[in-house]
Amino acid sequence: MVIDTRLVRVIRRGSRTVVTDIAIALAALLATTPGGSAAEPAAARYTMVAFSNASARDLDVYESSDGTDFQPLALSAYRPPAGFVRDPSIFRHTDGQYYLTHTTADGANIGFARSSDRITWTPMKSWPVPLCCALLPGTGDGKGPVNPFGITGSAGFRDGPSLSPFTTKAWAPEWFIDDGRVHIIMSMSTGGGFVPYLLTALDATLTRWSWPVPLDGLNADRIDTTVVKVGSTYHAFTKNETKKVLEHAVAPALRGPYTFVPPGEWGTLVEGPTVTQLPNGDWRLYFDAYKAGKYLYSDSSDGMKTWTPPKELPGISGTARHFGVLREPA
């Protein structure tokens, strides 16, 4: 047992300071003693936004205190004026409002909405991804012939470069906040495979956005990319659309270059990764086993070096699809 020297000094002081010094000493002991309240996990509130097997047009909102047991907060809370609300992502802005971004499945338009309470949502103007991407790298949709020249890319040949400057799809947008700047990571296609790109908000209203910039190193035919920063390292989790598996890559900066590292044993036919930190400090990766009709999770307690075998998320597995999770102090 460690004895705080302040306890000894209390004996040598006048009676007027005894009570104060004892309180300070006990607080110090509690903070350094295993099981003391200072070592307890920080309380958190997790908000999940999802679409469901029943409807890709309606947003369901769930809440949890531990990141495992999610309960409905508002089912069918929001339906956009047109299109879908697939692949939703949520964050809380500096104005105190909650903001949603999602796949519309209406061409290359990204959907937006905002809410003050996570229950009642107001649609915002969709953002059309601009003409940007002639010779966009990617892999084809598997319908054309293999390029005999060995050049990898997207439309035209099955693995050939796209010759179109038109972005035909902008899917799976994900919020990412870095040093106070608001970004969106999205998957873009000009008719073939998807490539991860980055948009940056040009003002606090989130109504003007930068030109799309590719995430260096993640390369072609990857979709559903999400990024989390741990210390000074950026961790990207993305779906390899050819192999139908989740991959893990790291980088020293948000834009890359990313280097792939060994992933967990997350299986095949999985997509929609989402990462959050648990109250005990561990990291949790959620993902959609879409063919099996299950939602799974896998945890890491060593800074995302190793991961536990996947488990089925109770309660909402088989109902919720490709969701986003926001962690806030309780």
Image (cartoon, rainbow, N blue to C red):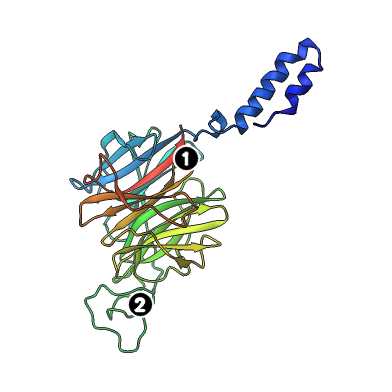
Q: Quadrant of residue 10?
A: top right
To which residue does mark 2 refer?
Answer: 153
* Residue 108, visible in the rendered structure: yes
Question: Decide: marks 2, 1 in contact (CB < 8 A)?
Answer: no
* Residue 112, visible in the rendered structure: no
Say what secondary structure mark 1 lies in.
loop
Q: Amino acid at mark 2?
A: Gly
Q: Quadrant of residue 173?
A: bottom left
Q: Amino acid at mark 1?
A: Asn
- Look at discs 2 and 1 and give the one toward the viewer: 1
The residue lying toward the viewer, choosing from 102 and 123, is 102
| Depicted 123 relative to depicted 166: above or below | above
Say what secondary structure mark 2 lies in.
loop
- Dot 2 alpha-carbon crowd within 10 angstroms: few under 14, some 14 to 19, many 20 or more: many
Total count of labels: 2
Q: CA distance from mark 2 to mark 1?
A: 43 Å
To which residue does mark 1 refer?
Answer: 280
User: Which dot marks residue 103?
Assistant: none
Of the numbered discs 2 and 1, the one sitting upstream in the chain is: 2
